[in-house]
Amino acid sequence: MKTHFRVADPISIVLFTAFGAVITYLMAPLVLIVLNSFNTSTYGAFPPPGFTLDWYANALFQVPDFRLGLVNSLIVAAASTFVSVTLGVLAAYALTRYRFRQRETVRTVLMLPLFLPSIVVGAALFVLFILVSLYGTLTSLVLSHALLNLPFVITVISANLKTFSPQYEEAAMDLGANGIRTFFEITLPNIRFGIMLATVLAFVLSFDQVDVSLFLARPQTITLPIAMFKYTENYQDPTLAAVASLMILFAALVALVAIWLLTRSRLSTYL
Amino acid sequence: MSERNLKRTLIGLLGPAFALVCGLFVPALAILLLVSTFNFAGGRYQTDVTFQAYRGFFGDPFYYHIIGQSFLVGITCTAICLLLGYPTAYALTKIRRPYLLLISYVLVFSPLLTSIVVRAYGWLVLLSDSGITNWVLLRLHIVDSPVRLIFNFTGVVLGLVHFLLPFTVFPILSVLVRLDPALREAAADLGANRVQTFLHVTAKLSFPGVFAATQLTFLLAINAFVTPQLLGGGRVVVLPQQIYQNITVLNVPMAAVQSLFLIALTCAIAAASNFLFSRTRLSSLG
């Protein structure tokens, strides 16, 4: 029996060569963006003729849409994360801890935004927000992002609630704590890593949202991904590479936090 | 807990989330359904029910071409994703050292954390006429002059596969890691070599994962907007781009009809593939 990994094994060589090729393919555009952000060539020529930091200066100080977009994106991401995590924790608690007749129907309705094409959700919300005069407001973006993130929050929190037994909650109740006190003193501390993970996830999803924001953002409420999308449609210079590099750096930091949370919450097996 | 108390608790817990979905999502879809029946004239839509957009959409061969293109993009990307995704998932189950495994997981799934616009832009840089891909091709004398790799079908597929691949790997991986290693050992003990064991045990048992991956990848592919928009250069036009295009010219009835068509298509494909899947599962068991 072959229980030891052998370096000369031809099947493994083929498998791991293919694996290396796939990793290269996945990483190549991200690496090239970072390289290109220091490229003196306006067209992103390779090999780069020289090194410059001008594109970073350009991105930070010359293109007002990027700065405005960053501020709007941070506001929308923070507000929509707060809304979706709060509503999601309450809903997930009801869906995992109580038995009731319409439970599966309610779950399906709450997961609905996940299953429909996001471009369709964007078009539909665009028409709705014009009718109720919310079109062009940050509120419309916050509500839409909260709606889109709700299914993800509910999934993560439900998984975390399944990792600890409801007996602890029952014990607290038996000892005289009411439902609300039990929720705050027993349930919440036990799912804190799940809540943090859901918060990170919701924030990133909102911060990177394009398909729906594209229909809702106006010049004053433009978000960073929309500003980048419009810039890419019109220009090709490495200013975008500078912005993108900063976003990749941000994503790398988020990845570290997410890994730490996943290991601490031990909920990766329940997702 | 009494029936009345339970009801009150549930309303308190589920009410806010339910209100967000039912107060925003449901009316938005209802309005879309209503507007799809309206008339479009003079650069805006009128509130008279004519079903003009339905006749326009289903009566114009131009839209059949776009639907065909959506399918072509979806099928091509799904096939490539499965071809690349299965070995990737399989390799991930074969890595023994914990830190190598962690790094591999991060490398495979981290593209999900970067914005789709960032990734599409990365492909623009990578595949442009003066970019690294053409430089390598020229240096190796594979081509004499730069090849057009973006603003065409190739560019859209390369960019979309990059976006879709983590979604293909994940369902396959989650089935592969749950396979009982005793089954493979049993096959080996019964005299099967590694190829036979893979074909008769691993490949067969991982079919549910492959099925889920195929369904998810294809549905995400036909609903993708940003990648075809930025890398297609107007030469590859798929249905989501048409929806966006019609909204920007305020032809809301047409955008609504196309949106409803895309929803129907998504649901039909999901339902049909689920049906086929349950049939094959039952026949393979019986």
Image (cartoon, coloured by chain):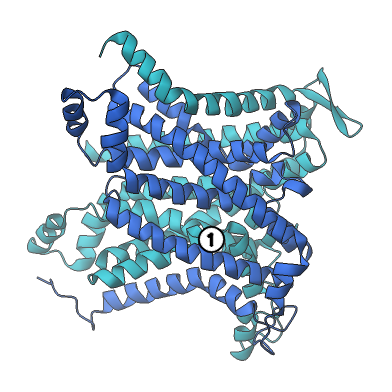
The image quarter containing residue A11 is bottom left
Q: Residue A176 versus residue A149: which sits nearer the camera?
A: A176
Q: Colour of chain A?
A: blue
Task: Identify the residue position indicated by label 1 in the image.
Answer: B114
The image quarter containing residue B147 is bottom right
Circle 1 SS class: loop
Q: Quadrant of the N terminus of chain A?
A: bottom left
- Residue A238 appears in the figure: no
- Residue A56 appears in the figure: yes
Query: Residue A40, image x and y in percent?
Result: 71, 84
Query: Residue B20, image x and y in percent?
Result: 54, 28
As drawn, is B73 to the left or to the right of A86? right
- Picture residue at 69% right of the left edge, 78% below the top: A44
- Picture residue at 83% right of the left edge, 25% below the top: B39
Q: Residue B283 versus residue B146: which sits nearer the camera?
A: B146
Q: Colour of chain B?
A: cyan
As drawn, is B113 to the left or to the right of B46? left
Query: Residue A46, image x and y in percent?
Result: 65, 84
Answer above or below: position of A173 versus A188.
Answer: above
